[in-house]
Image (spheres, grey):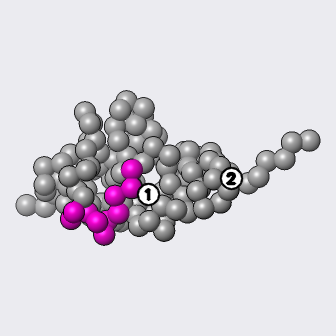
C-alpha cells in the first residue's frame, strides 16, 4: 500500500513552526553550509538510516525540507512507513527563499539574511 505524502507550502510551514513543529533539513552538509533555515536541524539523507530516530516533530508532524522537494518527499515516505508523522516542504529551500522566509548563510560573512532579497543594504 503506497504512502500518501503530505506536502505543505512555506506559509503553512512557518505557521506550524511558530506553533512548535520542528524543521529537519535532509540536504547534505555542503548544501547546508551554503544556506539553511535558522530553525532547521540537519539530518542528511545519506545519514538517515542511522539517524532517522532523531526526527520528531513534537506535537505536530515533522517538517522535512531539501533543495527542491524531491528528497524530502522520499524521506517523508520512509518516516511515515516507520511510524514517524512527517510532511514535506513543497518546493524545498528554493521555495523557502523565494517566499522570503529567514535563512542563514554561514559560508558568507556569518550574517543572517531575510530571504531571497539578500543584496547588501546601503544606508544613505
Magenta span includes 27: no
Q: Position of residue 19 (x, y in %)?
A: 37, 30
Q: Which residues are magenta?
A: 41-50
Q: Quadrant of residue 50?
A: bottom left
Q: Position of residue 72 (x, y in %)?
A: 33, 60
First in residue order: circle 1 vs circle 2: 1
| Residue found 35% across the figure and 41% down from its top | 22
Labelled pair 1, 2 in contact (Cβ < 8 Å) = no
Q: Secondary structure at mark 2?
A: loop
Q: Is residue 96 left or right of residue 74?
A: right
Q: Position of residue 93 (x, y in %)?
A: 48, 57
Which quarter of the figure is the C terminus placed in? Answer: top right
| Residue found 50% across the figure and 54% down from its top | 36
Q: Is most of the magenta stretch helix, strand or loop? A: helix
Q: Is residue 91 visible?
A: no
From the viewer's side, name the closer residue of 12 and 122. Answer: 122
Q: Secondary structure at mark 1?
A: helix
Q: Is residue 109 visible?
A: yes
Q: Which residue is mark 2?
A: 118
Q: Which residue is mark 1?
A: 92
Of labels 1 and 2, the one closer to you: 2
| Residue found 41% across the figure and 67% down from its top | 28
Amino acid at each position: 500500500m503506497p504512502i500518501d505524502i503530505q506536502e505543505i507550502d512555506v506559509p503553512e510551514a512557518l505557521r506550524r513552526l511558530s506553533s512548535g513543529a520542528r524543521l529537519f533539513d535532509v540536504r547534505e552538509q555542503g548544501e547546508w553550509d551554503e544556506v539553511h533555515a535558522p530553525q532547521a536541524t540537519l539530518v542528511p539523507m545519506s545519514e538517515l538510516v542511522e539517524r532517522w530516530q532523531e526526527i520528531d516533530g513534537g506535537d505536530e508532524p515533522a517538517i522535512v525540507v531539501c533543495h527542491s522537494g524531491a528528497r524530502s518527499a522520499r524521506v517523508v515516505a520512509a518516516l511515515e512507513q516507520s511510524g514517524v508523522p512527517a510532511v514535506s516542504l513543497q518546493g524545498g529551500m528554493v521555495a523557502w527563499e523565494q517566499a522570503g522566509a529567514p535563512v542563514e548563510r554561514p559560508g558568507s560573512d556569518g550574517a543572517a539574511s531575510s530571504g531571497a532579497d539578500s543584496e547588501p543594504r546601503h544606508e544613505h
